[in-house]
């Protein structure tokens, strides 16, 4: 007993010091920006040190004639995108999960591609493809600009970007379930429709509902597609209105804060509804040992199914990629699609004028630092949450999860309100450091969740055995925890790198004068009419993101094989 009494306080001290630093870091990174949004919304004069007239901004903003239409339009947009994603993703996922679809891995890869294409870049690709005198009109003689620049067009662009979430969720769920239980129901007299509705559907309903809620959240949070298409389509959403209140004169800090809280409430409601659904609406099979499921043959439906997959993949992935690449490699848009108009000049321009090279260097540097910071904080946070029993673990878990549920524009607003205050002796505002804070806050949940999943698979006995044999906490972390979590952590850090290297909304809100990122460069080139240069940078961005994710997958496999 004496040994335990002397060792335990040392262990508690060794845990509490880094944990205190971790709480401080997460407080500055996550809690403080959220707190300042709330304070600015309640006290409109907080930036001047005044606490007078509390809550007046709520009435002023909510009573404006455009606030309710903005809220209803955002809700309508998110709901329609979620429903459209279900209508596309569920049938395709069911076919992929239950039947032997030709070229199945190819379709999976093509449906993953929208995650590699920044949404704003995909939207610009759709504009180049479908607008009057666009590539579709050059090839087929028709243009769909009237459709693209409408509410339906913006919904379609967003749906094609997010429906793979439903597809992969449903296909994986059905691949695990198979048709074995449905066949049993058929043997006992149930008809085809009843066996599907009473057996198969309940088993995958949580996956459908959870993925639909996730697409709703992503739709109302995404800035790039509504910003690129929404203004010309007359579609105004909360996310674009918040950005306008910071960029258009007169700047409305309090109004932007109130709208940010509204958007955050919508996103958090959908997020927690998703988690509650997954927690309390699970259906289980009680059939003993798991049985490997064998996909069924499509038979006469083979070619129709192949055509459907080809049309969806071509529309969602190949069409915008074609428009992006064609613009990057053609000298002028008016020159059309012909060999004489091909050029590498836009890629040369990225390095010739210096702006493209500077933007690429800034983005890659910021993405690398973001990956390193979030990787270190994520591993330490995950280890504290999973492997310790200290007080405050639930709060720490909530802090690391919160950015995942908050729209990116809300994080940007919070950082502006936090660090653009006169009472700070030093501030990262108006420096590249504010972008690093924004990226780290937004992307911290990825390393935390990946590392947490890996740590839960590591037995506590390994750490206990090392401590019994005299290893310090740092040695245990360095020699045991880090090598075993490295595959998952590296994958998460590379995902962070890929996303941070082309993030848009916080870059537009927070980038100081003279600092350009890849996303800002593409956005500005498109607005200035140098579309080819912007699309050349887009090609480089897509190739960089895809290469980093491929490298991450390769390293993870190597680590897993080595272990």
Image (spheres, helix red, strand yellow):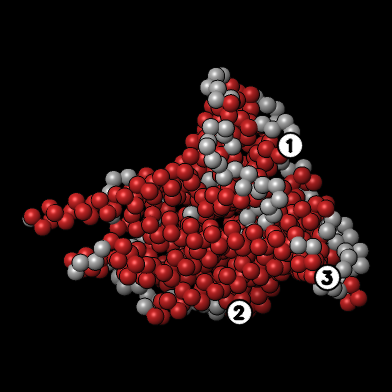
Q: Residue at x 67, y 56 (%)?
A: 517
Instruction: Give how far across and how far down residue 83 sits, in percent.
Output: 61, 52
Q: Residue at x 66, y 48 (%)?
A: 511
Instruction: Give how far across and how far down residue 176 sits, in percent.
Output: 44, 69
Mark 2 vs mark 1: give the one in front.
Answer: 1
Q: SS of the residue at dot 3?
A: helix
Mark 3 vs mark 2: give the one in front.
Answer: 3
Classify residue 535 as left or right of residue 42. Answer: right
Disc 3 from disc 2: Cα separation: 40 Å
Contact (Cβ within 8 Å) of mark 3 with mark 2: no
Callout 3: 10 Å neighbours few (<14), some, many (20+)? some
Classify residue 474 as left or right of residue 224. Answer: left
Q: Nearer the viewer, residue 357 or 164?
A: 357
The residue that mark 2 highlights is: 102
Q: Residue at x 75, y 50 (%)?
A: 229
Q: SS of the residue at dot 1?
A: loop
Callout 1: 10 Å neighbours few (<14), some, many (20+)? few
Rendered image: mark on residue 345: 3
108 to 161, vertically: above or below: below
The residue that mark 1 highlights is: 248
Disc 2 from disc 1: Cα separation: 52 Å
Query: Could you tell which of marks 1 and 3 lies nearer the N-terminus?
Result: 1
Query: Could you tell which of marks 3 and 2 lies nearer the N-terminus?
Result: 2
Query: Could you tell which of marks 2 and 1 lies nearer the N-terminus?
Result: 2
Q: Residue at x 70, y 27 (%)?
A: 65
């Amino acid at each position: 007993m004496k040994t335990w009494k002397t060792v335990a306080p040392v262990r508690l001290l060794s845990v509490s010091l880094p944990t205190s630093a971790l709480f401080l870091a997460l407080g500055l990174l996550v809690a403080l920006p959220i707190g300042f949004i709330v304070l600015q919304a309640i006290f409109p004069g907080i930036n001047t040190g005044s606490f007078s007239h509390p809550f007046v901004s709520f009435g002023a903003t909510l009573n404006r004639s455009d606030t309710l239409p903005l809220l209803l339009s955002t809700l309508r947009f998110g709901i329609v995108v979620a429903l459209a994603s279900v209508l596309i993703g569920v049938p395709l996922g069911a076919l992929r999960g239950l039947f032997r679809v030709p070229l199945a891995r190819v379709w999976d890869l093509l449906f993953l591609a929208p995650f590699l294409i920044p949404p704003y870049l995909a939207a610009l690709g759709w504009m180049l493809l479908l607008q009057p005198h666009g590539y579709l009109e050059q090839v087929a003689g028709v243009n769909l600009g009237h459709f693209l620049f409408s509410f339906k067009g913006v919904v379609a662009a967003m749906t094609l970007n997010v429906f793979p979430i439903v597809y992969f969720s449903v296909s994986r769920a059905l691949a695990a379930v198979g048709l074995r239980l449905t066949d049993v129901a058929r043997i006992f007299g149930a008809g085809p429709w009843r066996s599907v509705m009473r057996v198969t559907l309940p088993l995958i309903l949580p996956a459908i509902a959870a993925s639909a809620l996730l697409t709703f959240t992503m739709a109302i949070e995404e800035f790039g597609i509504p910003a690129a298409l929404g203004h010309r389509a007359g579609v105004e959403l909360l996310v674009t209105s918040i950005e306008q209140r910071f960029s258009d004169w007169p700047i409305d800090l309090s109004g932007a804060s109130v709208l940010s809280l509204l958007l955050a409430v919508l996103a958090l409601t959908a997020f927690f509804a998703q988690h509650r659904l997954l927690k309390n609406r699970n259906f289980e099979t009680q059939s003993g040992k798991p049985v490997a499921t064998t996909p069924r043959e499509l038979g006469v439906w083979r070619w129709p199914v192949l055509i459907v997959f080809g049309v969806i993949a071509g529309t969602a992935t190949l069409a915008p990629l074609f428009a992006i690449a064609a613009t990057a490699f053609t000298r002028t848009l008016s020159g059309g699609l012909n060999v004489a108009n091909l050029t590498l000049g836009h890629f040369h321009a990225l390095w010739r004028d210096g702006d493209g090279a500077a933007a690429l260097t800034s983005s890659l540097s910021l993405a690398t630092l973001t990956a390193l910071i979030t990787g270190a904080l994520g591993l330490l946070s995950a280890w504290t949450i999973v492997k310790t029993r200290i007080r405050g673990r639930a709060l720490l878990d909530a802090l690391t999860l919160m950015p995942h549920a908050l729209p990116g524009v809300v994080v940007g607003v919070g950082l502006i309100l936090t660090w653009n205050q006169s009472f700070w002796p030093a501030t990262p505002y108006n420096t590249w450091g504010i972008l690093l804070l924004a990226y780290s806050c937004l992307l911290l949940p990825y390393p935390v969740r990946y590392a947490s999943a890996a740590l839960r698979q590591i037995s506590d006995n390994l750490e206990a055995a090392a401590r019994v044999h005299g290893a310090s906490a740092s040695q245990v972390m360095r020699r045991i925890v880090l090598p075993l979590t490295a595959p998952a952590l590296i994958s998460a850090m590379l995902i962070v790198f890929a996303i941070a290297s082309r993030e848009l909304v916080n870059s537009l809100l927070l980038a100081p004068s003279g600092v350009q990122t890849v996303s800002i460069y593409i956005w500005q080139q498109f607005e200035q009419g140098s579309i080819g240069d912007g699309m050349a940078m887009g090609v480089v961005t897509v190739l960089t993101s895809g290469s980093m994710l491929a490298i991450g997958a390769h390293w993870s496999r190597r680590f897993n094989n080595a272990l």
